[in-house]
Amino acid sequence: MILPPNEIINDPEHSQIKENSKISLDYQIEKVLYLINEVENGLDKQAQSLYWYIKDKTTLYNVDSLIHNLSILIEYYHAWVVFSYIGTITHKKTSYSALKNDDNLNSAIEKLFKENSIGILKITKDENNEYYEKCKKAFLHAYKFLFVGRFHEIFALNNYLKHNRIAMGYAPKVSFNDAPLTLPYLYIEKPNDRLFNASVTKRLFEHDCKNEIINDDNDYYIKIINNTKVFLCSLGAYNIYNINGVEYIKSSTQVGILMESIVEIAHELFKNIVTVVKESAPGATSDNQVLDQFLNELNKRPPKILSELIRPIP
């Protein structure tokens, strides 16, 4: 923790709040690992199935739960960064809000710091604003992977699933270089896209992205599409793209995300969070040994994303 101990030495509740945020994060990390394993097992079974739809609803339930719990993991991690990683002189409810990596980032961070009393000292003198800058540097290090991008797509999808509609599932069989592939995905159909929050997913409903999208309004998400879009293949009337590390399947009326891509996003989010947690308490601690075991478990099955499956063999 960056906050000087003398700032909270007379606050008996500080240690409890700090510890509870760590316990909650540890629990969520382990739960997400469990759900990743369950989803991977379900997808491996689906690959052996003859059906073009997901017959075992347990797989859909687990994918839904994984999406929901990845969002919870982000929210718990946010609280851990505030209360444990950096530290604050006040302890009240804190809420995760997506930060865009654009010209307004500094003002958004200042607002977040002010709302959570981060970078403020009551007892210790802050020479030349050094403590505030130290907090900001630590925040950027711990939070940069959460700036609106691929993980935000899962957060937006969870918001849609939690408040509006279910996402449908399909699992077509294809052949690539005479090798059979199964491509299970979740999809949303028009007009339900009107219920989706601003995101790349929503913009894909609004635009045909075969060519570069005109971006007169300097839209954040269209910029991501134009800068990172890679066409992977066609599947009948559907086109499959990798956009900012997320594999989307798109038609004129539907937009979906391949389930293996959701698994890969879960892997990356898990590793990023575990890395920062380990860095906060370096050394061969019992907590870090457990986290290393989790990482070993996670790495047993690499995500079977389409981008890798269709990559030419050198």
Image (cartoon, grey):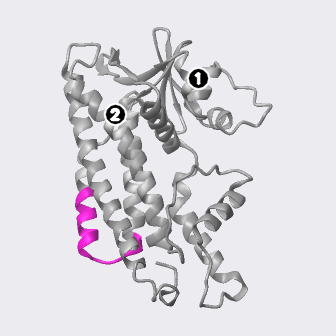
* Circles 1 and 2: CB atoms closer than 8 Å: no
* Residue at x-position 58% and y-position 46%: 148
Height in image: 172 above or below 73? above
| Closer to the camera in the image, 109 or 277 | 109
Q: Position of residue 231 (x, y in %)?
A: 54, 25
Q: Residue furthest right?
A: 216
Closer to the N terminus: mark 1 or mark 2? 2
Q: Is residue 176 magenta?
A: no
Position of 225 with respect to 21 (left or right) is: right
Q: Which residue is mark 1?
A: 194
Residue appearing at x 47%, y 27% in the figure? 164
Q: Residue at x 62, y 78 (%)?
A: 120
| Residue occupied by mark 2 | 64
Assign a secondary structure to mark 2: helix
Q: Image check: 223 left or right of 256?
A: right
Query: Where 163 sits versus 30, above or below?
Result: above
Residue 149 figure quarter: top right
Using the image as rendered, state which of residue 57 and residue 117 is in the foreground: 117
Q: Residue at x 43, y 31 (%)?
A: 161
Locate the C terminus by quadrant. Answer: top left
- Main SS of the magenta part reads helix
Asked whether residue 295 is in view, the answer is no
